[in-house]
Image (cartoon, rainbow, N blue to C red):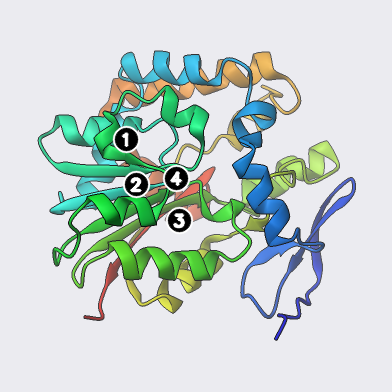
Amino acid sequence: MQRVHRGSVIARNGEFAVIDCRKCGYAHLQDLPTQQEVDAYYTRDEFYRTHSPDDWFEKEKREHEGGYWQSAYDYEIDLLESRSQVVDVGCGTGYFIHHYRRSGSVAYGIEPSASAREVSPLHHAYLFQDIAHLRQNVALGHSTDSARMAFVLEHLLDPLYHTLEVRNALVGPQGRLLITVPNEFNPLQRRVEQRVGHAWYVQKPHINYFDRQSIRRLLKACGFKVVYQGGTFPMELMYLMGYHYIGNDTIGRRVHNWRLRFEKLLGPSVYKLYHLLYNKLGWGRETIIVGERYET
């Protein structure tokens, strides 16, 4: 039976509208694409060919080789509690896995994009196209096997189904799942939206729009106990301070680099500040949430 999606429109950007869907329990586009359209978009590698800037891979390499993501990665590794084996689902160029393996731990990546896999620093033995290929080549089943999904669920037509798939295939009975998604409809974002006059963050290829409560509900519905929920740098604050990066790539890169230098200087402890801002004020461009599987 086809799922019926109903709910009030809570954000608009041109032709795109987002509803707070009562059936799904989270917000998503009012007019959903078909699964065939979504599959075709990623099969053709459209995300990196048309959505991302032309120098995206070079930019990622510079940032990671400069150590600008080490604070974030070290903090996430701590949240995963150095589990026996970690699979990064939707790992992009694989720098998180590269960093994780350099610490002596076991980790693998799953990435459907051929162009991202081609430029990855990972050895091909640690990087796979999908879950099926990984399971054919890697022994899974340790009780503490864990997974990471960063900036994945907002792109999927059925995030509940895919989270369950990852849980059942990759996460052990005492394992953890770390998810990062944009923290939509947060107070700072709504302030900026009033200034800009439209919901600029509603755009292709994002299908789903999670707030702090809806991502928590989804994780719990998939059989996880939430053991951590926090945020990242409150980027919208920069706009409200006068750095109008929306629609301006030059300013956007400037404030992005400021943020990276700030985090490199302070180290992983800066996420304690983000955690406070997120849980006290709702600030933070993204939500980081960790669930521990409680079913055997």
Q: Is residue 281 visible?
A: yes
Callout 1 amino acid: Phe
Compare marks 1 and 2 and give the one earlier in the sequence: 2
Describe residue 18's horizontal placement relative to residue 107 as left or right.
right
**Mark 1 and 2 residues: CB-CB less than 8 Å, in contact?**
yes
Q: CA distance from mark 3 to mark 4?
A: 30 Å
Q: Residues within 10 Å of mark 4 (few under 14, many from 20)?
A: many
Image spot of residue 269 (x, y percent): 26, 36
Compare marks 1 and 4 and give the one earlier in the sequence: 4
Would you place residue 289 above or below residue 272 in this image? below
**Mark 3 and 1 residues: CB-CB less than 8 Å, in contact?**
no
Q: Residues within 10 Å of mark 2 (few under 14, many from 20)?
A: many
Image spot of residue 17 (x, y percent): 83, 57
Describe residue 64's horizontal placement relative to residue 259 as left or right.
left
Q: CA distance from mark 3 to mark 2?
A: 29 Å
Which one is in front in this view, the residue at disc 3 or the one at disc 1? 1
Callout 3 amino acid: Lys
Q: Residue furthest right?
A: 15
Compare marks 3 and 4 and give the one earlier in the sequence: 4
Would you place residue 211 above or below residue 117 in this image? below
Q: Which residue is mark 1?
A: 96
Callout 4 amino acid: Gly
Describe residue 49's horizontal placement relative to residue 66 as left or right.
right
**Mark 1 and 4 residues: CB-CB less than 8 Å, in contact?**
no
Which one is in front, 44 or 93? 44
Which one is in front, 208 or 20? 208
Image spot of residue 107 (x, y percent): 22, 43
Q: Which residue is mark 4?
A: 90
Q: Which residue is mark 2?
A: 88
Q: Which residue is mark 3?
A: 280
Q: CA distance from mark 1 to mark 2?
A: 8 Å
Image spot of residue 52 (x, y percent): 63, 27
